[in-house]
Image: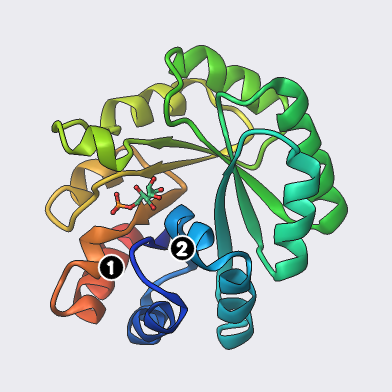
Amino acid sequence: MELQLALDLVNIAEAKEVIKEVEDHIDIVEIGTPVVINEGLRAVKEVKEAFPNLKVLADLKIMDAAGYEVQQASKAGADIVTILGVAEDMSIKGAVEEAKKQNKKILVDMIGVKDIKGRAQELDELGVDYICVHTGYDLQAVGQNSFEDLVTIKSVVKNAKTAVAGGIKLETLPEVVKAQPDLVIVGGGITGQDDKKATAAKMKELISN
Ligand SMILES: O=C([C@H](O)CO)[C@H](O)[C@H](O)COP(=O)(O)O
């Protein structure tokens, strides 16, 4: 099981500071959608150059022009690029094809997908690398989480790795770990803590045991 740090509410300089603090305890660093909107793919490039040993995920949440966007993110240094599960199958296929060409990975974000089970089966057959159940900020605000959806995708996905994101904290991590996803994505659960390093270290320990 791997740990991904999601950076959403920072600029590039702040992102590098946070990564420096926790880099020993994370496997992947996510350049979050708001960071890409504010700073562009330059954020991916600068972080990959500064931390070449970490895998970098570009959270583009692609909806269209998938092959082109995967190509651009790959050029910037991303190891993993995200596309939305609600995108057309043609877009998913385009993303997977381009990622294979570039030797990169595709993570599908299931945010907004109504039939989680059925769509996860389809995406698995389309050859994506990760399927991620995700409760975004707007549904976290009304108390939702993706823990049940994680169990659902675990029951049907045969080839892809499974991932979970959305409001995961140190206190809720044991419940997530029980479902044995391949990847746990944590943003505010680390970045919102005074001692980010200690929190990331405890999370990594929970995930590894
Ligand atoms: O993808 C995310 C969200 O849509 C904002 O871009 C976050 O990176 C993801 O939800 C993880 O962050 P936390 O919910 O703060 O753990």
User: Left or right of 99: which side holds 198?
Assistant: left
Q: Is mark 2 within 8 Å of ligand 1?
A: no
Q: Position of residue 3 (x, y in %)?
A: 40, 61
Res. 190 image quadrant: bottom left
In front here: 3 or 58?
A: 58
Query: How many residues crowd around disc 1 within 10 Å: few (fewer than 14), some, or many (20 or more)?
Result: few
Q: Position of residue 148 (x, y in %)?
A: 28, 26
What's the residue at 17%, 58% (across, down)?
170
Is residue 205 visible in this depiction of the protein? yes
From the viewer's perspective, is residue 76 above or below residue 166? below
Q: CA distance from mark 2 to mark 1?
A: 28 Å
The residue tagged 2 is 35
Res. 22 image quadrant: bottom left
| Residue type of the residue flagged with mark 2 | Val
User: Left or right of 187: which side holds 124?
Assistant: right
| Residue type of the residue flagged with mark 1 | Glu
Q: Which quarter of the rendering shows the C terminus?
A: bottom left
From the viewer's perspective, is residue 82 above or below residue 75? above
Q: Position of residue 39 (x, y in %)?
A: 53, 68
Is residue 1 visible in this depiction of the protein? no
Res. 141 image quadrant: top left
The residue tagged 1 is 205
User: Left or right of 172: which side holds 97?
Assistant: right
Residue extending farthest to the front is: 38
What's the residue at 53%, 12% (across, down)?
118
Going from the N terminus, do you reach mark 2 or mark 1 first? Answer: 2
Q: Are marks 2 and 1 in contact (CB under 8 Å)?
A: no
Q: Secondary structure at mark 1?
A: helix
Query: How many residues crowd around disc 2 within 10 Å: few (fewer than 14), some, or many (20 or more)?
Result: many
**Residue 100 image label:** none
Q: Position of residue 134 (x, y in %)?
A: 38, 37
